[in-house]
Amino acid sequence: MSETDILTAQFISAYTYLNKHSNIKLSDEIKLKLYGTYKAATIGNCNTPKPSLLDFRGRAKWDSWNELGDISKEEAKQRYTDILEQANVGWSRDHVDNDENSSDADDSDKIDNETMDTPRDRWTYVSTFKALLSSFMVIKVALSTHIYSEILAISGDDMFSYVKQGKSSEISGILESGEANVNAKDNQGLSLLHWACDRGHLDVVKLLIEKGADINILSDGNETPLHYACISEHFDCASYLYKNGANILLKDEDGLTAFEHCSIEFKNSIIQE
Amino acid sequence: MLVNQLAIREAIQPQPSASSSQRQKDMSSHKFWNNNLILGEVINDNGPIEENTPYDQIHDDAMFRFDYSGDFLKWALQPPGYKQTWHVGVRVSSTKRLVAFISGIPADIKIYDSYQHLVEITFLCVHKKLRSKRLAPVLIKEITRRSHLEGIFQAVYTAGVVLPKPISKARYYHRSLNPKKLIETNFSRLPHNTTMSRLIKKFKLPSETLTPGIRPMQEKDVSAVRTLLNEYMKNFNFVAVFNSDEDVRHWILTKENDPLTKKVTDFFSFYCLPSSVIGNPTHKTINAVYLFYYAVQESDDKAIKGRLQALIKDALILAKSKNVDVFNCLDLMDNKLFIEDLKFGPGDGYLNYCEGQLAL
């Protein structure tokens, strides 16, 4: 095989692979690059009129093809295979040998349709807050660090993670084993019960109190667990604390009681219940 | 720096009908390119285009969807001087079912020193089952043709997607008013190590507005607001021009009463556009408002900043008192002067502004 033949075989293998695996997720940028180089490799230099102002998708694709200028088909094939290989989606040049039925798809429209239909390709979408590092990842990192550094000790940090996630059976297990302090505080000066109230995990609140957590334990800012339940409007938790004798007169560092942080309706329905 | 404040004028995604899968089958097997399209029917009634779809039948991964009301669409589609022929619907000839829609409205804009009367493309929607059937280019050609008939050859539009060569680009910013609900709906995330209580305290607002003399705008203020607004807009390079009191009356004066101060030294406005929350057991809707036009009678940056911060804070307070969950704006006009201090945070959405020749 000549070098050109090898290149062509690689190119055919590459786009066949992409067509067969329509579930592959690629960024718009890569999709556009693949589109442009595919066109240049199969048709040649850009020979269609510039799409309408309003056809932004058509324009983006046209731009991607047009800006390749007068590159040769060979160069385009080379670039196409480079892009796909670098995209790390399971295709590499090694694929070529095992690829027998490679001639089934000469259909650039198929590529267009299957690869250009993510939600972000739409004209519009509802903006939301830019995603932060997900809490799930943070927990994983925290846990794995502990697994390596403190294999023997059951870490207080793990307890806090379980409380934040509302994992009552794990918490129960650790408390049964007697290896954790139910009134421990974290580096923000908050106890397990504060966190359980803040997140609204009623079963964890009950569990902690049954296991001897101080119902009026104060944070560094002099807030009780009831403050957290009221500010975060977790009615069930606030109501449970109230019924179990939480002191409603305690004031935080701003001089406010828990019920002074919530609406009159919230307070009344707890007291009247 | 830009601005057509027309974040409202985005394409809509109609909800697919779940009422009859049989009917949809019939539709998708239609040969759409064989003259089964009727172009040019004007939509006159403002009922829902489709029945709402149960959440479990929506398969895309969007979590929120703009929830346009009939009144909102009328506001966006029927400004002074609107042309019915620029509201173009496509129906299937046999069933009369509306499957696609495009609209344009007349707009006057100023780009640097040049005034242009052009068409602003506001909505483009294609039934979910018919996407990727190349219906959009047909609609675009048709609205182009109809613009040409009116002697208009320039267009402007915005889109959330990245456009090839936008004239300007703005980013959405969000200010939580109801942080707990926003977290429960995944509109925002609660960092692992942050308490909900801290977040709620951070975004807490006074229950009453702070600016002395603030009051709702009235009919008698229309002319003063127009003067004030056009004067203030001179600070920017790409703006909508309000040529008549009628424009101000339509876009800014509402029955709901937008607030402004006593001698009309300043004004601000915002509009409501809720989003439906998809697949959430407790919350169906996020009540969102979008900052619209505003103007202050100050000239130096520091004075504008102080004034704007006070005004927009009052806007937040008013929105909060109307049970709004999130207050949105774009980073255009002078918004950068208050975004940070008033605790707005960056969104993942952008708005791209495109302007140019409309060619068939």
Image (cartoon, coloured by chain):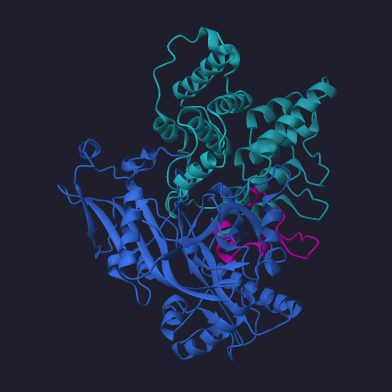
Chain colours: A cyan, B blue
Q: Is residue B109 left or right of residue B295?
A: left
Q: Quadrant of the N terminus of chain B?
A: bottom right
Identify which residue, A82 or B234, lies in the foreground: A82
Above/below status of A81 relative to A123? above
Identify which residue, B77 or A185, lies in the foreground: B77
Identify which residue, B65 or B180, lies in the foreground: B65
Seen as rendered, the residue at the extreme left is: B94
Query: Where is residue B75 drawn, in percent x and y?
Result: 38, 70
Q: Residue at x 54, y 41 (%)?
A: A64
Query: Where is residue B193 drawn, in percent x and y?
Result: 73, 44
Query: Where is residue B23 drawn, in percent x and y?
Result: 21, 40
Q: Residue at x 73, y 29 (%)?
A: A175
Q: Residue at x 42, y 31 (%)?
A: A108
Please provide the residue range marked out in magenta.
Answer: A241-270
Is residue A207 something one can see in this rendering?
no
Residue A244 belongs to the span the image colors magenta: yes
Q: Is residue A143 left or right of residue B271?
A: right
Q: Quadrant of the C terminus of chain B?
A: bottom left
Residue B171 belongs to the span the image colors magenta: no
Is residue A136 something one can see in this rendering?
yes
